[in-house]
């Protein structure tokens, strides 16, 4: 049988836990600003319950509307992993619902991001377990395969690799290459210090100094009338 697109990779390199945890609580918007504002996934993939997530990407590629390989991945993923599912953006059938989300939570999995749909939206909306999806539908999934586990996937238009650091909040989701994470973390800390000072000036003195605005307007030849 041809095994192209039909494989499970059991092992991959996870980043140090302390590196992953260093990103917990950092706004995705700030991380994105320090990644040239090009790295956040499609805005149509949203939080189902407003909870933030932070962990290591455990990737799955499935056909639209089929969750066979997700069922297997739930048994293989480790505590602290974020299950990231490339379901091709399909919206005709849900990839998961309350039972699967509950099982993932019970195993210590740190959240789910699916480029596809979920169901049982009311129940997931009340869970203390972060789930991000493209939408909801009551239609259940097929369980035929094929699929792949722990390969590079495309979720919300961005490539996510197994072992990437995944951070999500109400603004969206972003994935960070662990080799780039220390430099990004340093830049984010510097940005947060700068923004804290700007916010203090705005709140205390009503000042928001942005000389670059007039400089740019002059550069592009803006006419005042």
Image: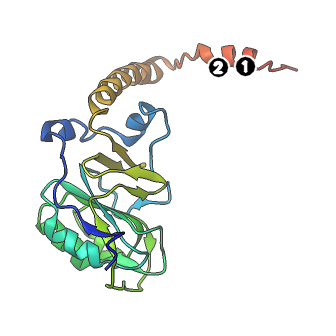
- The residue lying toward the viewer, choosing from 147 and 216, is 147
- The residue lying toward the viewer, choosing from 155 and 198, is 155
Q: Which mark is residue 119?
A: none
Give SS at disc 2: helix
Quarter-wise, where is residue 45 in the image?
bottom left
Residue at x 73% of width, y 15% of height:
219
Instruction: Give how far across and how far down residue 114 sits, in percent.
Output: 37, 64
Residue at x 16% of width, y 62% of height:
77
Quadrant where the image shows the C terminus = top right
Quarter-wise, where is residue 113 in the image?
bottom left
Instruction: Give how far across and how far down residue 125 sits, in percent.
Output: 32, 69
- 100 on left or right of 62: left
Residue at x 52% of width, y 17% of height:
207
Instruction: Give how far across and how far down residue 130 sits, in percent.
Output: 27, 60
Give SS at disc 1: helix
Q: Is residue 40 visible?
A: yes
- The residue lying toward the viewer, choosing from 129 and 11, is 11
> Against 83, is 214 above or below?
above
Q: Which residue is mark 1?
A: 217
Q: Are marks 2 and 1 in contact (CB under 8 Å)?
A: yes
> Against 126, is 186 above or below?
above
Q: Which residue is mark 2?
A: 213
- 99 on left or right of 221: left
């Amino acid at each position: 049988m041809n095994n192209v697109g039909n494989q499970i990779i059991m092992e991959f390199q996870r980043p140090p836990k302390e590196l992953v945890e260093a990103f917990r609580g950092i706004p995705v918007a700030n991380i994105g600003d320090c990644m040239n504002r090009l790295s956040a996934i499609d805005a149509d993939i949203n939080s189902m319950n407003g909870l933030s997530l932070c962990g290591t990407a455990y990737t799955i590629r499935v056909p639209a509307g089929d969750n066979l390989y997700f069922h297997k991945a739930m048994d293989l993923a480790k505590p602290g992993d974020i299950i990231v599912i490339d379901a091709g953006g399909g919206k005709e059938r849900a990839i998961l619902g309350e039972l699967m989300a509950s099982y993932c939570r019970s195993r210590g999995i740190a959240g789910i991001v699916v480029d596809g749909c979920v169901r049982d939206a009311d129940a997931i909306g009340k869970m203390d377990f972060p789930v991000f999806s493209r939408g909801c539908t009551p239609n259940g999934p097929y369980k035929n395969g094929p699929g792949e586990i722990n390969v590079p996937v495309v979720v919300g238009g961005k490539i996510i690799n197994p072992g990437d650091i995944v951070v999500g909040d109400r603004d969206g989701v972003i994935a960070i290459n662990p080799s780039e994470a220390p430099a990004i973390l340093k830049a984010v800390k510097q940005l947060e210090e700068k923004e804290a000072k700007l916010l203090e000036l705005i709140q205390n003195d009503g000042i928001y100094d942005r000389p670059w605005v007039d400089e740019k307007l002059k550069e592009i030849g803006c006419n005042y009338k």
